[in-house]
Image (tube, helix red, strand yellow):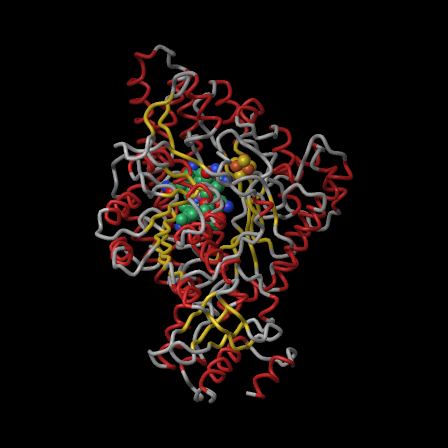
Amino acid sequence: MTGIRCLNSHAELPLSPRDRLLYAVAHVTGTAPALGTRLGSVPLAKPGVVHNALADGLGDTRTVVVTGTLDRRLVLIEHDAGGTWTAADLSGLPHGSRAWPAWTQGQLTIAEPRGWLSHAEITSEGQRRLLRPRLLLASLYHPENFPLPRFPLAISDLARAARSTLLGHVELMDMQLSVSLEDIIGRATSGDVDILGISVTFGQHDLMTWLLDAVTSSDTPPLVVAGGSLTARNEKVLLDAYPDLLIGRSAGEPTIADVLAHWHGDLEADQIRGAGYRGAPRGGGTVGIGRVRRTATVANRLQTDMWPELDLLDTTFQHKGVAQLEASRGCTNYCSFCPRGHKGQWAGAAPDALPWILEEMGAIFDQHPHLSRTLYLVDEEFIGRSDDAAQRALAVADTLVDARFSWETSCRVDQVVRLDRDRAWHVERAHLWRGLAERKLRRCLFGVESGVTSILERFNKETTGTQNALAIRTLTVLGVPPRFTYITFDHLMTETELLETYAFQGRTDLLLRAVPELGVEEIVDCVRDEEWVAEHTIGCPFYTGISYMLVSMECLIGAAYTRKVEAIGLTGRADPSMGRVEAAYADWRIGVLSRWAQLWIDRNFALDYTLKSLEKILDDHPHQVVRGLRRILKNAAYRLLGGMLDLLGTTSTLIGHQEELADRCSALAEGLIGELQADLTPAIAGVEKGLPPDHRQRLRREYTRWAGTDAWRLINAGDPCGT
Ligand code: B12
Ligand code: SF4
């Protein structure tokens, strides 16, 4: 054992976490594990696999616990039944430096807190808490809508929060990764799960109710807690249907940690942070269900640990998925169509909190050398409003570059141009954006949403048409690769506003040529000089830069915009699947146009999505050609909008003309789809020649399906929020 003590007192010894795992085994058995043992190659990001490898290697009689978070993984191994334990912190940091959860007091005693490896005493209650509850975190998914898997951040973040409590153990299942709903139901009702946590986003209400029906009707149902973007919208509907359900109403880290404590009886339901639930029926014992209760949520700025466990990252890559991470949470604004309840106000992680997680993710990337080393930072607003916002953003970008990542993210336009700020501010911002582009920012999404100031006011975007125009010019001249989202139709818009929308989308003085040789001061001045702008336009209308054309407003449940529509009696029934409310248009003619625009989107969605995916993976010339194909689709969409506006202009506002306008839109769309096919057929044939065989087949299959369709029908895909 002296060798082991020696390890603790020489913390600088270059041991890896894997070495420490092997030392821990030696500490228990007195001998080093044989060379080539499974433990020598076990993936440390997957504690379940580590546990099984340890249990196999050590024999079934001793209890093994692998707990704690990825950066502070804690391995506890029992020596003999009822005897002492070995405790190893695989990070190499001393046990005494861990923020031990309160429950461990008196239940788990480390003999040598100054070392990472130590004997430990654990009471039987302590052992029970280390082993229970068994938490299953499940993420739902409709593969037919969005075939590209993304690393499941929500359940991975929750897993970290749960493991940091050292209570019980956590297992993750994600339907994107070859797991079916039946698999989740089977596991959740197997008797081996005490708590089921379900993460649900838009379009998954059906899956959610099937799962809840199956689980709640099983013999010994686990405690069920559900969260995510959709449950935040459907909280009431869900609690009405499933009175025993707990709902996570915000960032779920504190909630899930408290649910584990609640399972042990340490907390009452009303002490679980950020929860919605049904209280006991009034008058105790009476028949009926109690009213919905809500506990306070935790602000993002108090919850800056937003890192995931990485159990599923390797599996995501095996399924050709992409890596996601957040560097900030929440937003600086309150757009009227974007309910903020569960996403909250902006708070960013300090850049120096990132390197360890990037290193861990990088190590998993290294095992997939053919993958593009790109990280999708799914921040709602990458930069934020702190005093040091620009420096922080650059420092985050430096950290990403140091870890050899390219990256993409989203941001508000007012981080580029603000009409209430002076030239010096704009010069600083131009430096920032050029700096980010130099630091491997592959693409940034800007939610422009409109170029018409009266619409922007209704959306509470806190931006104006002029500001948006200047921002688009600035970004393109700086060479930042932007993407823009735009809400073309909204329920409260007027005919004039729609005409102005059409005009803005057609402007050719917004997308400018990148001029890398021009200094940022000059750029700030030049984008305001119409003559200079005319000389530097790329000649393409702005709509060619819009990610998804012809999008209509969605009245999300709980949004201020929805309340405005409701106030004038335009809302209809709720659609729980998309967390929205159906609504009519104040000008019914615009409603007809919006419907035909949606039919157009849906008819072309799969083909456009295929082209978009190809665009992502192709380089150089083939990339340009596929881009050209998408432009053909965008041109056709813009012509549809223009044609429909002409029809609207010649239609009386009297309600009796509804069918007539719809018929005329239908005829227009039919004609345009025919023309689109005539344009696309030779273009696709040209592109195919330059594509590798598997991509060629995929494009041919999708194109044949598209060309063989003559139906106009709505699907439930919506605008994939530009991501
Ligand atoms: C990736 C993404 C998508 C992907 C989803 C693909 C997939 N495979 O999952 C795609 C592109 C398909 C998509 C689509 C849409 N999206 Co989207 N999307 C995102 C994005 C960028 C990242 C999601 C994410 O991983 N977040 C990070 C994780 C950690 O956050 P989270 O999922 O919210 O999880 C936390 C909490 O919700 C909670 N939680 C989650 N699950 C659980 C479970 C339990 C048990 C508990 C207790 C807690 C809990 O805890 C988590 C950790 O804190 C977010 C922006 C964002 N930053 O969230 C927008 C976002 C969620 N999308 C949004 C919208 C509006 C949409 C669309 C409806 C757009 C549209 N109008 O059509 C469509 C839906 C279309 C459809 N048919 O499904 C909005 C929602 C707006 C709002 N305020 O609610 C967001 C917030 C973007 C925005 N600000 O506008 N989206
Ligand atoms: S739409 Fe975008 S900018 Fe507006 S509040 Fe939501 S996240 Fe923020």
Callout count: 0
**Which of these two is toward me, 465 or 411?**
411
Q: Is residue 98 above or below residue 719?
A: below
Rendering quadrant holding ligand 1? top left
Above or below, 444 against 577 in this view is below
Task: State the image coordinates of residue 338 (x, y, percent, origin top left).
Answer: 49, 34
Q: Going 58% across and 75% down the picture, which residue do you hit? A: 112
Image x and y of residue 476, in percent: 62, 43
Can you see residue 412?
yes
Question: Is the residue 9 above or below the residue 136 in the image?
Answer: below
Closer to the camera, 307 or 475? 307
* Apparent side of residue 238 relative to residue 690 in the rendered image (left or right): left
413 in relation to 81, above or below: above
Q: Which one is nearer the viewer's eye here, 539 or 138?
A: 138
Image spot of residue 114 (x, y percent): 62, 74
Q: In which quadrant will I find the N terminus?
A: bottom right
Q: Residue at x 46, y 54 (%)?
A: 158
Viewer-closest of 5 and 628? 5
Q: Quadrant of residue 469?
A: top right
Q: Is residue 522 left or right of residue 489?
A: right
